[in-house]
Image: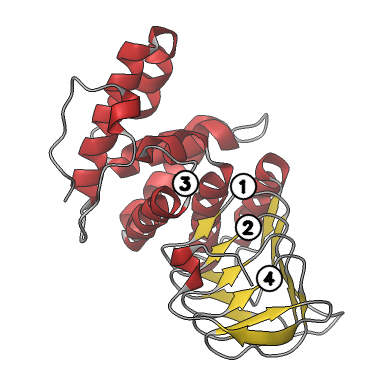
């Protein structure tokens, strides 16, 4: 649970309160409502926006469906239609909301620029794109491929992230900046992975079947890293910025270069430490 809230504090004073795990969706949602109310009081011009996106809703999933729908809407698919799709997905598979909660906390805990949880929820396109992908993945497994592909295209247009709806992505994923990300169809990303902008998890040509990377738990992928082919990046490994990985990476190993080569071990889980030194 979170430490006790003080509703009279300013947002700067509320910044980065300690989180004691495990947490619940209800405790996170309560905290976000306090943050939104405080921001609305400090910046009245945002009061209507914060009421519509957070304060009007009773649960995290209700607010999330509203937030995503507003962003995904276009001339072909209204916000109301997208919200119906999101709500159906959350009801059919509550694990999607559990994953969204874990993703949200990962952004808050791993990004020093994230001062409060609602900041990531409202403004971080890496989080928005990831939650939109989760709906497209649900559509894919419901055999609604045309709508899944439509949503993939919309995510790419809005967030500059191209994620195939069939890709398998775990929870507690942190996508920093969320720009220029490419994740191929047969990619498998385990829980608690972090990646920065311009990461590609792709193939090496026109192969069919299983042709994309497998990223294990606790991996950190630096900015501009390219991991190509049906290869494994082992648990707790670190891929340095700008590297091109064409071969398996062992657990708790740091690789760098073009092509990437092992340069030493790394302790713990770099995805949560976010230590990019090599």
- Residue lying furthest top in this view? 44
Visible residue check, residue 57: no
Q: Secondary structure at mark 2?
A: loop
How far apart, in angstroms, are the residues tagged by discs 3 and 4?
Answer: 20 Å
Q: Which residue is mark 1?
A: 177
Visible residue check, residue 46: yes
Q: Which residue is mark 4?
A: 240
The answer to whether 86 appears left or right of 78 in the picture is left
Q: Which is more toward the observer, 272 or 62?
A: 272
Q: Residues within 10 Å of mark 1 (few under 14, many from 20)?
A: some
Dots 1 and 2: beta carbons under 8 Å? Answer: yes
Q: Which is more toward the observer, 55 or 216?
A: 216
Q: Which is more toward the observer, 105 or 204?
A: 105
Q: Residues within 10 Å of mark 4 (few under 14, many from 20)?
A: many
Q: Which residue is mark 3?
A: 112
Q: Secondary structure at mark 1?
A: loop
Q: Which residue is mark 2?
A: 196
């Amino acid at each position: 649970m979170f430490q006790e809230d003080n509703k009279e504090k300013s947002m700067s004073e509320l910044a980065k309160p300690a989180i004691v795990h495990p947490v619940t969706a209800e405790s996170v949602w309560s905290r976000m409502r306090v943050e939104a109310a405080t921001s609305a009081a400090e910046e009245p011009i945002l009061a209507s926006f914060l009421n519509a996106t957070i304060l009007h809703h009773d649960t995290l999933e209700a607010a999330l469906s509203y937030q995503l729908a507003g962003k995904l809407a276009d001339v072909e698919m209204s916000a109301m239609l997208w919200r119906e799709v999101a709500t159906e997905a959350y009801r059919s598979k509550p694990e999607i909301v559990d994953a969204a909660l874990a993703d949200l906390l990962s952004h808050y805990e791993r990004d020093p620029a994230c001062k409060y949880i609602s900041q990531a929820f409202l403004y971080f396109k890496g989080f928005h794109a990831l939650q939109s992908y989760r709906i497209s993945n649900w559509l894919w497994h419901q055999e609604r491929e045309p709508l899944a592909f439509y949503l993939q295209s919309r995510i790419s247009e809005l967030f500059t992230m191209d994620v195939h709806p069939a890709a398998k992505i775990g929870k507690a994923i942190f996508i920093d900046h969320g720009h220029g990300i490419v994740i191929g169809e047969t990619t498998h990303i385990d829980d608690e992975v972090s990646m920065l902008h311009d990461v590609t998890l792709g193939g090496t040509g026109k192969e069919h079947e299983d042709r994309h990377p497998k990223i294990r738990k606790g991996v950190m992928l630096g900015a501009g890293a390219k991991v190509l082919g049906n290869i494994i990046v082992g648990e707790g490994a670190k891929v340095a910025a700008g590297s091109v990985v064409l071969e398996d990476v062992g657990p708790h190993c740091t690789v760098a270069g073009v092509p990437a080569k092992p340069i030493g071990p790394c302790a713990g889980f770099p995805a949560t430490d976010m230590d990019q030194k090599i």
